[in-house]
Amino acid sequence: MRDLEARRAELAANLERVRRRISQAARASGRGEEPKLIVVTKFHPAGDVRLLAELGVTDVGENRDQEASAKAAELAGLELSWHFIGQLQSNKAKSVVRYADTVHSVDRSSLVTALAKAAAHEPSRAGRPPLACLLQVNLDEDAVSGRGGALPAELARLGDLVADAEGLRLAGVMAVAPLGEDPARAFERLSACAAKLRADHPDARMVSAGMSQDLEQAIAAGATHVRIGTDVLGPRPRVL
């Protein structure tokens, strides 16, 4: 019990610091509405997620299907929104649609087809909202098609595919700032991509960007959701 209370206190303090950073960044950029915090819980036990829920966290992110599906099943009674944020193989779509509310890593037409087919045939999705899909954008200026996200030039067609797919909802865009580049510049490009997508799909307003090291730059560029892991949960637990 003492260990549990110590962990709760640690998470509460970390959350307070992260939420303060988010609030300060939003004020500095002149925004009236603060971005939503998604706590990335990969490698951490379901017990930590339960504590986070008790501390007011509503959105959690995972990037490995096997781990995510087990946690979502164990914590099914909690009011949590599950975000799948990792690279997603098409053959995992059937599993992911069972628990995910949002998929952040839609980057190719074959994955759109797989998610739509899985959503249409998954009984547990009956009565649930359509699966929210974010187009993952590769912000590397030297990027090639098919690696680490869709190219900006591919977003219009990919967005149309998601918007036309039954059981899916085009929600917006997601990106990670390239290593070695000023994240502010990278997120400016993401903001431009998001604006172009909204011109054709006005409801695709979600911009998932910013992690522990660059959330301020992401918020300044218009992020609506930030994905924070280590600064809330600490380093990954050691495997004994």
Image (cartoon, rainbow, N blue to C red):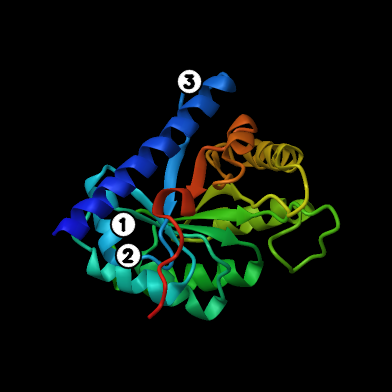
Q: For marks 1 and 3, give the CA distance.
A: 30 Å
Q: In the drawing, what numbered circle is on residue 125?
A: 2
Dot 2 falls on a residue whose secondary structure is: helix
Q: Which one is in front, 50 or 174? A: 50
Q: Which residue is mark 1?
A: 128
Residue at the image position 26 percent from the left and 70 percent from the top: 73
Q: Which residue is mark 3?
A: 32
Residue 235 x %, y %: 46, 60
Identify the mark nearer the N-term, 2 or 3. Answer: 3
Residue 133 x %, y %: 52, 55
Q: For marks 2 and 3, give the CA distance.
A: 34 Å
Is any atom of residue 79 visible in this view? no
- Say whether marks 2 and 1 touch (CB < 8 Å): yes
Type of the residue with mark 1? Arg
Dot 3 falls on a residue whose secondary structure is: loop
Front label number (2 vs 3): 3
Q: In the drawing, what numbered circle is on residue 33?
A: none
216 vs 78: above or below: above
Type of the residue with mark 3? Gly
Residue at the image position 62 percent from the left and 59 percent from the top: 161
Type of the residue with mark 2? Arg
Rate crowding at label 3 as few (under 14), some (14 to 19) or many (20 or more) other CA atoms within 10 Å. few
- How many numbered marks are there? 3
- Say whether marks 1 and 3 touch (CB < 8 Å): no
Dot 1 falls on a residue whose secondary structure is: loop
Taking the image as shown, residue 35 lies to the left or right of residue 16, namely right
Taking the image as shown, residue 47 lies to the left or right of residue 93, namely left
